Amino acid sequence: MSGVSVVGVGMIPFGKYPDKNIADLGWPAVKAAIKDAGIEAKRIRAVYSGTARGGAMVGQRIMGRLGLAGLPIVNVENACSSSSSALRQAVIAVESGAYDVVLVIGVEKLTKFGGGTLPLDEDDWEVRLGLSMPALYAMRAQRYMHDYGVKLEDVAAVSVKNRKNGALNPDAQMRKEVSVEEVLASRMIADPFTLLQCCPTGDGAAAIILASNAVAKQIRKDAIEIRGSHLTSGRFMSGFRDMTSPEITVRGAHEAFEEAGLGPQDIDVAEVHDAFSIAELLYYEAFGFCPRGEGAELLKSGATSIGGKIPINTSGGLIAKGHPVGATGAAQVVEIVRQLRGEAGPRQVEGAKVGMTHATGGGISGFDHGACSIHIFQR
Amino acid sequence: MAVEAAQTVNRPYLCGDALVVDARGHATLMGGRCVDCGNETFPRTPVCASCMGENIAAAAMPGQGTLYAFSTVHVAAKKWKKPMRIGYVDLPNRARVFTHLEGENLAIGDEVEVALSVVGEDDEGPIESFVFKKVRA
């Protein structure tokens, strides 16, 4: 156990806010988290702020808006794992005894790029030659379908489930259910992915307040304890690799479960990094929710739907809730905390006690992904 | 044809010196071989990710490999020819190469060979790079 608990969460609905700057996206999430925790803002001792593409000093910009700057603020960039990596740093800081109450922010404004695929760094060899995130995941999907005989509609079914969940979440960017036919008939992006199998471009912000367990008990009765907090980077391999099994998440899951003294069978609800439809199936397998090659069967069985044995991405996930990259990890925590407190309304997982978040990303040559951060929570 | 492309485009290849084309238009990929541990990589890097050695020699890569995975991409930066077919090719020396692909009816497991081609166009003109295409039976 880490000795650290979540005492407050807040977010703004993910969506498109082209007229708002990043500070104005961020501060309402922070204010909501402070209100949710029911603490005075001055109790926050330090801030860890994650953004992938938001630029410099984003934490300061946001805290400045609220008149709360003047405390230690650390800005974290780790691609799609930016705010989950910020959370990891915040947990370490509280565990160390340096601070008893800290704030984690995740924020991103992707509409500033004007749509299309997420711009990647052309300094990277494969990016310069034309690789993009949809193309990378598309190759994973192609190889997975080839190796396991999985059909297009079985992969597209991830979007159907997650859009259904998103329709129940007021904070989701995409709130309309879709059929598998609609998913497959939408515009082709990177074969086999049609538009509805890709996370949308959007903006968003989320915030989390952590406290040491001792302080958390004074703040609220239903604080959510962090049982496992894990961050790792991908291993560089220039040669052959199995693209159907992301080593970074397989290894990260193993280590996170070991640290928490838990296993996949103990997880009641999880948010995993479904940037594209195939990803969710790969992560079912990477976390051991099912054996290799059986992800599509697990989905089809209903086990990962709300009401199933292990509901995944009840928020709608990246596909429906949206994926303002640096905000994603923090927003996943918002969902899991709401689930564990029993505040998830029509998408509530009955009796959920243990939840998990998983944010991984960063498209760079020679890596499955650059970063992966996994957190396990318990009420 | 690859030979024509080599004659009409007067600018560095997209992949720099990782591609060498001889007078007859024959394309060869140049990677790196660590003199200390023998690890071969593509592209060549100044330091070996297996042993941290810095004595990396240029090494011609095998010209044929096996298509590991690929996708036909419809949404990409303006400069690329679309739809753009891209994939990973596994070479016999265990290097994996990200590449543009040419030709129809490709399948995972196909034997493919390297060639030179135009893969896009920008303000400076056509963009040339290496591509892989099916080995003719």
Image: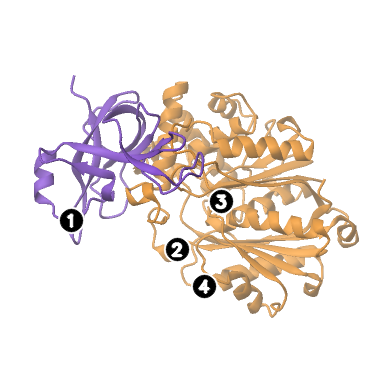
Label 4: state its secondary structure: loop
**Chain letter, colour purple in render:** B
| Residue B84: % across, % down | 27, 43
Q: Which residue is mark 1?
A: B11
- Residue type beneath disc 2: Thr
Q: Quadrant of residue A70?
A: bottom right
Q: Earlier in the sequence, mark 3 or mark 4?
A: 4
User: Label 4: how many residues lie within 10 Å, few (<14), some (14-19) or many (20+)?
Assistant: few
Is residue A351 among the parts visible in the rendering? no
- Residue type beneath disc 4: Asn
> Chain A in the picture: what colour?
orange
Report the Cα–Cα distance between label 3 and label 4. Answer: 20 Å
| Residue A139: % across, % down | 40, 36
User: Label 3: how many residues lie within 10 Å, few (<14), some (14-19) or many (20+)?
Assistant: many
- Residue type beneath disc 3: Lys
Residue name at image x 58 percent, y 52 percent? A81
Report the Cα–Cα distance between label 1 and label 2. Answer: 34 Å
Q: Earlier in the sequence, mark 2 or mark 3?
A: 2
Q: Which residue is mark 2?
A: A111
Report the Cα–Cα distance between label 2 and label 3. Answer: 16 Å
Label pair 2/4, CB-CB below 8 angstroms? no
Q: Earlier in the sequence, mark 2 or mark 4?
A: 4
Q: Which residue is mark 3?
A: A321
User: Label 1: how many residues lie within 10 Å, few (<14), some (14-19) or many (20+)?
Assistant: few
